[in-house]
Image (tube, rainbow, N blue to C red):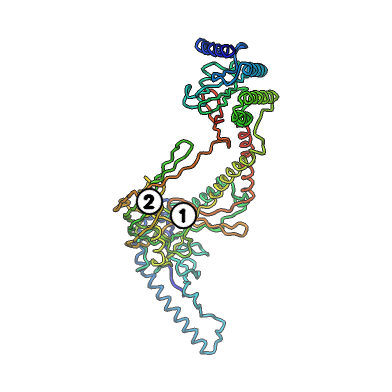
Amino acid sequence: MASQITNYKCPACTGPLHFVGASGMLECDFCGAKYDVAQIEAMYAEKEAAAVAATEKAEEKAEANRQKLADMEAQGWDTSSLNNEWGAEADGLKAYNCPSCGAELICDASTAATSCPYCGNPTVVPGQFSGALKPDYVIPFKLSKEDAVAALKNHYKGKPLLPGAFTKGNHIEEVKGVYVPFWMFDGQAEGTVDYEGHITHVYESGDYEITEVEHYDVRRGGSIAFEKVPVDASSKMPDDHMDSIEPYNYKEMRAFSTAYLPGFLADKYDVTVEQSQERADGRCASSLEGALRRTTTQYDTCITKSKDIRLRRGKVHYALLPVWMLHTKWNGKDFLFAMNGQTGKLVGDLPTDMGKFWGIFAAIAAPVTAIAAAILMLM
Amino acid sequence: MKKRIFTWLLALLAALTLVVPAWAEQTADDLFVYDTVGLLNEDEWLELEMMADEISWRYNCAVYIVTVDDYEDYDSDIHYAAANIYNGNDFGIGENREGIMLMLSMYDRDYDLFVRDDGTAQYAVNKYGRHQMTEVFLDNFGNNDWVGGFKDYLSACDEYLSLAEQGHPVRKPLIKVLPMALGIGVVLALAVCLFLKSKMKSVRQGAEADAYVTAEGLNLTEQYDRYTHTTKTSRKISRDSDSGSSDHSGGGGSSTSGKF
């Protein structure tokens, strides 16, 4: 299981390098040196290839160890308590040695960048983004952990139904900067929608109110092209959170490089294109329907009778997008918040204090009722 | 003879209307009952005139009775017809020209109860008061009992002005307004609270991909609109009150009008 991992070290002092969103450069915590991403990328291209080879070598070594254990058993040593069988779990786990302190790290098979829990050294797991798994794009983090914490505090403001104890008593359990894998779908939606359109005229004639409704058969057909519709490709990330922090500014999208990853967590996809495309298709079809409906504004009401929407699927891109995940606990319940690491848009459902709800209800209902009664009596 | 005197009084009123300056107001010599149609005989007119005169000066709020052949001679809208008669003849007592006027238009049997705004009259007879007051005379007029109807009207004015003077004007009882007031309070409070509750939820599944549409936007290839038919429905307009009356305001007063 054990395999080698690489980390980006400062060429000047060998301290660990982190990608800093604000400067867009890799920075050394120890000597403060700053390096351009492309510069470090070139320097480490060779090292990364070597690390992949080392990983394969480590696998071979592990196999040799297993053989050795079998031999020991044959020589009469009791190794029954050593469990060599990982079962189904082995498929989902990987073990690495921290290049800084040597600790063995076991993490999810989809983890591509992480940090050592013992020494905090930022590391990138080689081989995770090689070949067909290599992302096409990455949007680097622009906002820091401090920005995420400040945004969460700001999220609590202007919410009178938030329990007072939640803001006072709750502690942020965890703040993680994660590069979340996304599939980005290009494509086109085309089709036709049939409506029944109504134009209503109301007028008075004597003591009667006359309502005339003109009925129309309405048909609209057309197409819309979409570019890079994102669908998160990580089963660990809640889809609704990821949808809610959209959109990202694609103008700042860069060709993928692992040099953007140090200092953050990164996952590779574990949801396939086939599993994700249904969500992208649904969103594109809805957008076409909405655009066609917006061409029927001359009608007061338009009821959909039938629709025929087809999707022409185009290219699929693989990208890593920056997300700050914040986790809090309150009253034994988990609350998860997600912040767009590029734009700062933060989402997360908050608990409602029903006591405050009914208190505000009464505080509004009572005076309004009294004022309304007084006005009605004076009329 | 009596009829001649009455006609002479009306002619005098018309003449005065032309010469009275804009700031003129009701004086002790002026009349309160103008029966231009001739529904009343002289005794009846005199009795009503004395009654109206006594009430008007007791409360310093003139109470008028006016009958006309057709209100449309004054304005196409009955409320403005009443307002034109009231303002055109400088009706009212005091600086604010306080007064209440009941006008009957005989051509289509219309009535209008006009109350001068912003003063004692409006304080004593508000919208609810006007509706309540019409209830007391409409049955008489429906039976062509003109004197009975006018007496009921003047008695009601006396009662309403008296109650207002005591600081207890006729108002809609709390029990009648409470359900509607409670409804308004509950709906408004619920709307505010549900809005605040909706702010607690910010996580939603993405339903559309509008942000990812290319610069070309929608390419509309088919557009077809065909008229098929028209449907027509009619509904009888229910007026403010169950007696078929309606309310208006403007021209310095508010009124309730309808048929008798």
Q: In which quarter of the view is residue B252 placed?
A: top right
Note whether residue A45 is visible: yes
Q: To which chain does the residue with label 2 belong?
A: A
Near mark 2 (Cα within 10 A), the count class, few <14, some 14-19 or many ≥20, is some
Query: In front: A130, or A281?
Result: A281
Q: Name the residue tied to disc 1.
A: A244
**Residue at the left extreme of this rendering:** B221
Give percent across and percent down for residue B187: 58, 44
**Residue at the front extreme of this rendering:** B1
Which residue shows up at 52% across the image and 54% down it? A348
Quarter of the image where the C terminus of chain A is located: top right
User: Is A28 situated above or below B174?
Assistant: below
Which residue shows up at 64% across the image and 34% down it? B172
What SS does tag 2 mark? helix
- In this rendering, would A99 be left or right of A77? left
Q: Could you tell me how many numbered marks the image carries?
A: 2
Q: In which quarter of the view is residue B207 placed?
A: bottom left
Note whether residue B60 is visible: no
Whichever of callouts 2 and 1 sits on the residue coming sooner in the sequence is 1
Q: Amino acid at mark 2?
A: Arg
User: Is A322 situated above or below A48?
Assistant: above
Q: To which chain does the residue with label 1 belong?
A: A
Q: Name the residue tied to disc 2.
A: A293
Which residue shows up at 38% across the image and 73% down it? A53
- In this rendering, would A338 be left or right of B151? left
Q: Amino acid at mark 1?
A: Ser
User: Is A67 situated above or below B36?
Assistant: below
- In this rendering, would B189 be left or right of A31? right
Give percent across and percent down for residue B108: 51, 28
